[in-house]
């Protein structure tokens, strides 16, 4: 999440430096997840092995008028906690469920979710709307550590 003030200066850099990271994330600990519950002040990033993916469905919420599409992706975090990530609207329909289920037949599928908010829908879950992105099996040290811990 970026916060701009009237003093913020932005400079366009056209040539991407070779050491520029492919992924920008900060994986939240269990304590950070608890502290961010129902706060809109900070986006939350998590990594985990996908254990379940729901079909898309529709629901009505207090904040959004009309029917809203949603899909729940359950992950097992590095702390062995099962955590639901609820994807909304276009994010729910864009999630590559078929490919993940196919690839999951031969190897665990790791997902890095960035830009989520921690919610308390009858227990802790994450909400992923337009700001949420995901990376499947990202080539980062956190993926390697997570897979090594499952052996």
Image: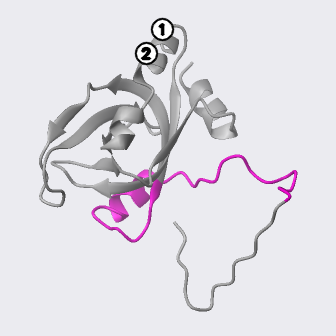
Residue on which the image places disc 1:
105
Q: Residue at x 33, y 49 (%)?
A: 126
Instruction: Give the structural element (helix, strand or loop) at label 2.
Output: helix
Q: Quadrant of the C terminus?
A: top right
Q: Is 28 on the left-hand or right-hand side of 84? A: right
Q: In the image as oriented, which residue stretches furthest toward the bottom?
A: 7
Instruction: Find the distance from the CA under tag 2 to the CA under tag 1.
Output: 7 Å
Q: Measuring 71% from the left and 46% from the top, which residue is drawn there?
A: 22
Residue at x-position 30% and y-position 44%: 89
Q: Is residue 19 magenta?
A: yes
Q: Decide: is 4 above or below 112.
A: below
Marks 2 and 1 close (CB-CB < 8 Å): yes
Residue 57 visible to an observer of this rendering: yes
Q: Quadrant of residue 17?
A: bottom right
Q: At x 82% / y 61%, what residue is drawn?
A: 14
| Residue situated in front as seen by the camera: 144 or 88 | 88
Task: Report the residue marked by disc 2.
Answer: 101
Residue 8 spot, x, y in % from top left = 63, 85
Circle 2 crowding by C-alpha within 10 Å: few under 14, some 14–19, many from 20 = some
* Dot 1: element: loop
Q: Which residues are magenta?
A: 15-44
Reply yes or no: does residue 27 show up in magenta. yes
Residue 59 horizontal/vertical position (percent): 14, 42
The image shows residue 71, relative to residue 52, as above or below, that is below
* Lateral position of residue 76 relative to residue 21, left or right: left
Magenta region, main secondary structure: loop
Q: Residues within 10 Å of mark 1 (few under 14, many from 20)?
A: few
Residue 38, how many percent across, how many down?
27, 63
Relative vertical location of residue 17 with respect to residue 90 in this rendering, above or below: below
Decide which of 116, 140 is in the foreground and name it.
Answer: 116
């Amino acid at each position: 999440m970026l916060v701009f003030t009237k003093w913020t200066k932005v400079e366009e850099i056209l040539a991407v430096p070779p050491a520029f990271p492919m992924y920008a994330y900060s994986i939240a600990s269990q304590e950070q997840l608890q502290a961010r519950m129902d706060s809109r002040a900070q986006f939350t990033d998590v990594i985990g092995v996908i254990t379940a993916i729901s079909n898309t469905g529709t629901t009505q919420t207090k904040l959004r008028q009309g029917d809203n599409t949603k899909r729940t992706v359950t992950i097992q975090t590095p702390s062995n906690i099962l955590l639901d990530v609820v994807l909304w609207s276009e994010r729910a329909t864009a999630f590559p469920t078929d490919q993940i289920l196919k690839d999951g037949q031969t190897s665990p599928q790791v997902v890095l979710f960035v830009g989520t908010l921690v919610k308390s829908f009858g227990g802790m879950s994450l909400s992923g709307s337009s700001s949420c992105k995901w990376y499947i099996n990202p080539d980062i040290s956190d993926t390697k550590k997570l897979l090594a811990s499952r052996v």
